Amino acid sequence: MATLAHIVRHPVKSIGYEPLDRVALTPGAALPWDRHWAVAHANAKFEGTPAEWQRKLNFLRGVTQPALMAIRAELDEATGRLTLSHPDAGTVTLEPEAEAQRLMDWLAPLWGADLPAPRNVVHIPGQAMTDWPDPFIAVLGTASLDALSAAAGAPLSPHRFRGNLWIEGWAPFEEFELVGRTLRIGAAELEVRERITRCKATHANPDTGRRDVDTLQVLRDNFGHEDFGVYAVVTREGEVAAGDQVQVT
């Protein structure tokens, strides 16, 4: 029997991950508060806050600066205040939009002076700042992570892959076979749409913020691709919680 093992959101794109016990899913929407904000850099191809989704290259990302991968997050949904912590930068608590300059000042040393400086915080109501404009939720299998860890010769943290829902009980990479099918988790349903092709952001250890495993090479050499996890969209609203049974239809 497959079960929902972990739920994770990332309130700011590429800047902090936060485990959750439960969450309510809504059709046509990403995981609540996931990639709710993003931080644009000085070379972004837009001015100020755009009116619509923008490509990921406009924002601070772990693929460019692996130190960002070690940030952890804790969001107070009632107040909108976000606490970020990093092993080198310490901890800061703020409101990302109202205190945008504090956020950018805290990020600047991690991002590095040789990169285009953090410029402004972006939030578009109703649009998660995910890598694609679609309201995707990333679904991953714990057995796939175990298989990849064995091939790499070291245990790999799930937070390298910045997924949302981790499923326990599937065979390694079984999720690839579920494209086009429906997952029933708790009261919610999701349709699996496509595989996720990965980038070298996954090379970084989220405990240290340093690249230590070439996950893409391990995937190519052992599994013949660079994919890990699948994208799904919510088709029926409902709450999901860690421990819920996962049924495939």
Image (cartoon, rainbow, N blue to C red):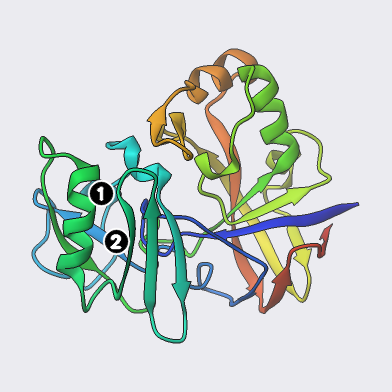
Q: Is residue 47 left or right of residue 180?
A: left
Which residue occupies 66% across, 60% down? 191
Q: How many numbered callouts?
A: 2
Q: Is residue 141 left or right of residue 94?
A: right
Q: Is residue 146 above or below residue 45?
A: above
Give the residue pinned by disc 1.
60
Q: Is residue 235 left or right of residue 86?
A: right
Kindly identify the amino acid type of the residue bearing the numbered disc 2. Answer: Ala
Residue 78: numbered disc = none
Q: Is residue 73 above or below residue 223?
A: below
Q: Secondary structure at mark 2?
A: strand
Kindly identify the amino acid type of the residue bearing the numbered disc 1. Answer: Leu
Mark 2, Cα crowd under 10 Å, few <14 / some 14-19 / many 20+, is: many
Whole-percent x, y for residue 223 in the image: 64, 20
Quick one: 131 or 104, which is closer to the camera?
A: 104
Examine the image and state in which quarter residue 173 appears: top right
Quadrant containing the C terminus in the rendered view: bottom right
Give the residue pinned by disc 2.
38
Circles 2 and 1: CB distance less than 8 Å? yes
Mark 1, Cα crowd under 10 Å, few <14 / some 14-19 / many 20+, is: many
Which residue occupies 57% across, 22% down? 219
